[in-house]
Each structure stands twice: as C-alpha cells, then as structure tokens.
Amino acid sequence: MNDAITTDAQTALPASELALLEARFPAHAVPVGGSAVVSVRERGAGPAIVCLHGIGSGAASWLGLALQLAPQARVIAWDAPGYGASTPLSAAQPSAADYAQRLHGLLDALDVQSCVLVGHSLGALTAASAARKDSALASRIRRLVLISPAAGYGAPQREEARRKVRAERLATLDELGIAGMAAKRAGRLVSAGASELARQWVQWNMAQLNDGGLRQAVELLCNADLLADLPPAMPVRVACGALDAVTTPEACAEVARRCGVPLESIADAGHASYVERPQAVAALLREALAA
C-alpha cells in the first residue's frame, strides 16, 4: 500500500522537484535514544532554525524556505514522530509534552544549543510546549515563531468540538485512506491564487503520511490546549496567511493576543503560507534571527 501511495503521489509532482528535494534537502535518520530515530532534512550553516510541520505535512514541505534561508542559517526540519521514517511515540494518545520530549532528544543529538523554533499549524502545539517557562528546552529557544497555529481542542469548554473533530478526522481517514484524503483535502491548505506547483507540493506532502502517525497526531490536536502553554518563556512572533481558511486570521489573533504581540499577516497566502509564499516567510524568519 505504501508503494502505491508513493507512486500515485509522485505523479502529481514534477520529477525535477523530487530531484531538487533529494539533492538540496535530503532526509537522514538521527538516533534519539533507545531504538527511536527522528528523520530530519537539513540545509545551510549558521544559527539554527528548527521547523515543525503541521498535521497534513512533513519535513519536505520546508524545501522552499530552506533554499531561501540556507545562506544565513542552518535550517532543520523534522518529520514528527510517526511521520516519514520517524519512530512513533509509544503512547496511543500522546500529549504535546511527549512530542516536545522527542524534540529535546533530537536537539541533543544534533547538538543544537540555541535556535529559532518555528511551529506551523499542529507543529505550534509542540513548539509552545517546548517553549513553556517550565520546559527543559526553554533556555535553548532564542525566539519562538508560530505560523497559523492550531489552538487544539483540549480546553474543557471545547469538549463537544473535541469529540466531533476526532470522529470526523478518523472517519475521513478510514473512508478515504491517505491518498484519497490528500486528493480531496490538500487544496484547502493554499489560497485560490496559489501556483500549480504549490498545490502539487501540498498534495504530495499529504500523500506521504503514515496512518499510525496521523492517528496519533489527531489525538494531539484533540487533547492539546495551545493557549494554556502561552505566553512562552522567550520573545515570540505570531503570523498567519491573510487568506488562511483553516486556522483563520481571527483565531490566530487570539493566540497573538495571549502572547502580547500583534498578529503578522502574510499577504496573498493560505494556510500553508511557507509553501505558497516562501520568500515572505523567509523574510520574517530573517528578522527573527537578527533580533
């Protein structure tokens, strides 16, 4: 089944793009203790920017951003536990703290003592947990950047929404499978004006998902509460695609308010802004590095 998914997905992405990915942003497995590994893609040298993807994506999605930033920074993008070749977490319903602990192991293994941490969508839940004032990782995060952050459904008042989202997400996965879900849902991640290549990339990234890793990520989405982990222990920037229909500017504005900072708008971009408008997001991250 995995082979079929990969073949179908590759037909939606030009071979030149796959060749560019493997030549300029190849994946490698990093042992992080016990028998666990984290698959990462790296490019560049200098201060570290660590990038955490959303629920329907993976490390490869940061290719365009890595190419933009490599002259100024070491861009490190992980495949979250259960994604790509990364070992899943042991708990069936892992918490944001469980993902943050795996991130801690990765930064130890890569000897990253200081970084700008970027969390996109679901990745913001892990990033915010890692950036809490009581987190063992907080002292190693120079700046936190949350892009179109998912708030999660773990707050007590969101119990009804939590049950509905879990049921709908898992039913969609059971009905469509990974490949069908990518074909049907990937288009929501970009704006109506996105290039055909950006559309191909978001669909290809979603088609690479693993069933088990995605199911764990659904539990993270349903049980985590981003706002409870904010404000972070370090300076933060919160940004959102101006045309984001998934984590809307209105929802992201509440995250920014909780952090005591203004929401930064990424013009002409939907949810996957760093895929659709990598130059704009790279400019934001250069500013974070320079601050």
Image (cartoon, grey):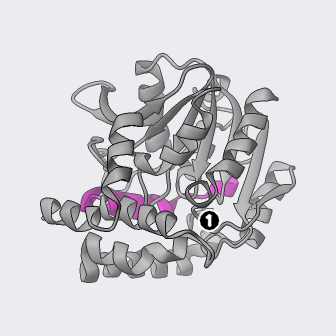
**Image quadrant occupied by the C terminus:** top right
Residue 175 seen by the camera: yes
Specify whether residue 71 is painted magenta: no
Q: Is residue 72 above or below residue 238?
A: above
| Residue 56 visible, this orientation | no
Q: Position of residue 4 (x, y in %)?
A: 14, 65
Q: At x 74% / y 44%, what residue is drawn? A: 284
Kindly indicate the quadrant of the structure image that contains residue 129.
top right
Image quadrant where one finds the N terminus: bottom left
Question: Which residue is farthest front?
Answer: 16
User: What segment carries the magenta color?
Assistant: 210-228
Give the x, y percent position of residue 167.
39, 80
Q: Position of residue 109 (x, y in %)?
A: 40, 20
Main SS of the magenta part reads helix
Residue 135: percent from left, percent from top: 61, 32
Tell me if 118 is positioned left or right of 291 in this view. left
Residue 221 is inside the magenta segment? yes
Query: Given the image, on which type of amino acid does mark 1 rest?
Result: Ala
Mark 1, residues whose alpha carbon is within 10 Å: few (<14), some, or many (≥20)?
Answer: some
Please give left or right for residue 90 compared with residue 93 in the image: left
> Which residue bears the numbered disc 1?
155
Q: Which residue shows up at 69% across the image and 56% down it?
A: 227
Along the line of sight, which residue is nearer the eye, 36 or 238? 238
Per the image, label 1 sits on a secondary structure element best described as loop
Q: How many marks?
A: 1
Which residue is nearer to you in this view: 288 or 218? Answer: 288
Decide: is 291 above or below 253: above
Left or right of residue 156, residue 286 in this image: right
The residue at 74%/55% (across/down) is 239
The residue at 26%/32% (across/down) is 36
